[in-house]
Amino acid sequence: MIKFNIRGENVEVTDAIRAYVEDKVGKLDKYFNDGHEVTAYVNLKVYSDKRAKVEVTVPAKNVTLRAEDTSQDMYSSVDLVEEKLERQIRKYKTRMNRKPRNAVPTGQAFGDEFAPLDQADEVTEESSEIVRTKHVALKPMDAQEAVLQMDMLGHDFYVFTDADTNATHVVYRRDDGRYGLIETE
């Protein structure tokens, strides 16, 4: 069963919008096994130029599903997000169905929160073959220096060791041109 946590930014979440989101995203319930309760975090935003953005995050046991869409119509964005999430689930399940059972560590069941896919629902996926491997030495630095290094290299992300905590972190360039930081635990 999917629970919903729906928030609106610059938009009132009306009963009609809530019902539409719960109906559309609720269709994903068929992919989850009975007894597994998941929460869909839905964030609805409306910008000053009347564009609507829908973000949905569904943290499950072994995978976090996330999709977003921005368009002029909130309802069509909800439709597209639901399609993206469904595609992600089918792709994930297809990979797990093809993974040899002996490759799963003892005590772990990959995707046990998801119901089995029908043969027709399996996704033909393009190869995710790794074609190049790079080895890098992680140098201790702060996030600002990591951003500078990333920009000098012309990359969209940069992995580094935080000089203060000695933890591995990643800085990345966001779609809006600003920067993000991923801190590992």
Image (cartoon, grey):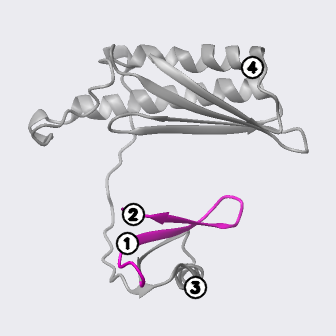
Tally of numbered discs: 4
Residue 129, numbered circle: none
Query: Viewer-nearest of labels 2 and 3?
Result: 2
- Look at 33% across and 23% down and name the residue there: 114
Q: Report the residue marked by disc 1.
A: 168
For mark 2, give the secondary structure. loop
Near mark 1 (Cα within 10 A), the count class, few <14, some 14-19 or many ≥20, is: some
Calculate the distance from the C-alpha at mark 2 to the C-alpha at mark 3.
24 Å
**The image quarter in which residue 94 lies:** top left
* Camera-side residue of 107 and 174: 107
Position of residue 89 in the picture relative to residue 42 (left or right): left
For residue 153, above or below residue 185: below
For mark 4, give the secondary structure. helix
* Camera-side residue of 144 and 104: 144
Residue 17, numbered circle: 4
Residue 179 in the magenta stretch? The answer is yes
Calculate the distance from the C-alpha at mark 1 to the C-alpha at mark 4.
41 Å
For mark 3, give the secondary structure. helix
Calculate the distance from the C-alpha at mark 3 to the C-alpha at mark 1.
20 Å
Query: Which residue type carries mark 2?
Result: Thr
Of the residues under marks 1 and 4, which one precedes in the sequence?
Answer: 4
Query: Which residue type carries mark 4?
Result: Ile
For residue 83, above or below residue 63: above
Of the residues under marks 3 and 4, which one precedes in the sequence?
Answer: 4
Across and down, in percent, residue 38 comes to: 44, 26
Across and down, in percent, residue 105 comes to: 13, 43
**The image quarter in which residue 106 lies:** top left
